[in-house]
Image (cartoon, rainbow, N blue to C red):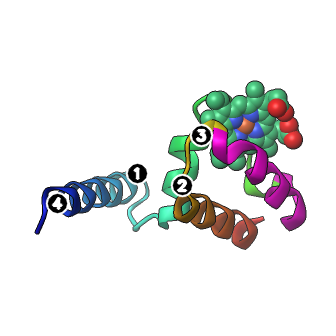
Amino acid sequence: MGARSFIAAAALGLLAACGAASQGTLRPPGEALYVDRCGRCHEAYPAHAYADGQWAGVMRRMAPEAGLDEPEAGAILAWLVENN
Ligand code: HEC
């Protein structure tokens, strides 16, 4: 295992541990990312605050603000439209 994949695995383990500690179940990665990365400058708006198409537009504007790469933005958008 290279250093990068070790760090990635450690980070994932940490996310999983936080989710499990806070609600007793494993948090979906999209939700954990959303709360962490989108809750920095303002509150993490509830998923039901916007419709699917609106979230897509918001993510186009906000993903660069949050420094997300495409897989991260995709995981967040998928979680938002599943839970709105
Ligand atoms: C670097 C700071 C920053 C980060 C990180 C950030 N936002 Fe924002 N966000 C803003 C600012 C500033 C506004 C208000 C001005 C604006 O609308 O551009 C805003 C407004 C919003 C709004 C209000 C609706 C709207 O259309 O203006 C939503 C929803 C939103 N952000 C979602 C997100 C999501 C989802 C993420 C994660 C991908 C995110 N934000 C990450 C700074 C940030």
Q: What amino acid is found at the position of numbered circle 4 in the picture?
A: Phe
| Disc 4: which residue | 6
Coordinates of residue 28 in the picture (x, y in percent): 49, 67
Q: What amino acid is found at the position of numbered circle 2 in the picture?
A: Asp
Picture quadrant where residue 83 is located = bottom right
Picture quadrant where residue 24 is located = bottom left
First of labels 4, 3 by sequence position = 4
Q: Give the side of residue 56 with respect to residue 25, left or right.
A: right
| Disc 3: which residue | 66
| Disc 1: which residue | 22
Disc number placed over residue 69 in the picture, else none: 2
Q: Secondary structure at mark 3?
A: helix
Coordinates of residue 33 in the picture (x, y in percent): 51, 53
In the rendered image, residue 50 lying in the magenta stretch gets the answer yes
Coordinates of residue 56 in the picture (x, y in percent): 80, 60
Q: What amino acid is found at the position of numbered circle 3 in the picture?
A: Ala
Measured Cα–Cα span from mark 1 to mark 4 = 24 Å
Q: Give the quadrant of the C terminus.
A: bottom right
Mark 2 residue CB less than 8 A from any atom of ligand 1: no
Mark 3 residue CB less than 8 A from any atom of ligand 1: yes
Measured Cα–Cα span from mark 4 to mark 3 = 24 Å
Q: Secondary structure at mark 1?
A: helix
Label 2 close to label 1 by CB (< 8 Å): no
